[in-house]
Amino acid sequence: MIRNSTVLKILLPALIPIAQLALAALSAAQSVDQVAQREVERRQAAMPRGEEAIARGRRAMQQKNFTVAHEEFRTAVSLLPDAVTSGKLHDEALEGFCASGVKLAEQKIAEGKFMEAESILREVLDERYDPNCHPAAELLAQMQKPGHFNKTIRGAARADAKARSLQQNDGPEIHRES
């Protein structure tokens, strides 16, 4: 009897922390599963809002309202995860963000707002959006070439004319200064 009680006295204190660790691990696994499930539900709930933002962005692009289109596509990108759950919707939102950003930047160039145009293009090319948006990269590279765009007061008068043509066409024609 003495041996059994001595063994129990030694083993029991060692078994209690082991049992507590086992229960803690089981509880942590359940909470991780719950967190993952809530995240899946959150992303699925955001998908219809992301799809609606894409549709509004497309309409704004057709109406040549590039500012609204750009904002709508930005919203769609933020709502739609880059994952299997959103399918190709996230990619579509990124493509729209790229295209609307380039059109908006071209419009800003035509208006003589070069810093705004550059800012828009840099945002499009940011890691969180689309660093592989080739039209944005090309336009930004053109903007950085010395003398490519006339950024003077005389250029601003031409920019007004280009802005008027933008409203009539798909976008401004960009010419090198002579």
Image (cartoon, rainbow, N blue to C red):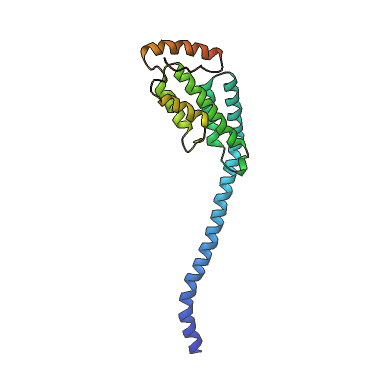
Q: Is residue 6 above or below residue 66?
A: below
* Outermost residue to the left: 152
Q: Residue at x 49, y 88 (%)?
A: 3
Rendered-image quadrant of the C terminus: top left
* Outermost residue to the front: 178
Comparing 139 with 145, the one in front is: 145
Q: Where residue 156 sits in the image (x, y, percent)?
A: 40, 13
Res. 72 image quadrant? top right
Residue 120 shows in the view: no
Comparing 162 with 54, the one in front is: 162
Q: Where residue 161 sits in the image (x, y, percent)?
A: 47, 10
Q: Residue at x 41, y 10 (%)?
A: 157
Q: Where residue 57 sits in the image (x, y, percent)?
A: 57, 26
Q: Seen in the image, is 121 located left or right of residue 42? A: left
Res. 148 image quadrant? top left
Res. 141 image quadrant? top left
Q: Is residue 107 above or below residue 35?
A: above
Q: Where residue 174 sits in the image (x, y, percent)?
A: 48, 18
So how many labels did they put on this image?
A: 0
Residue 138 shows in the view: yes
Comparing 78 with 98, the one in front is: 98
Q: Is residue 15 above or below residue 89?
A: below
Comparing 145 with 106, the one in front is: 145
Q: Residue at x 40, y 23 (%)?
A: 115
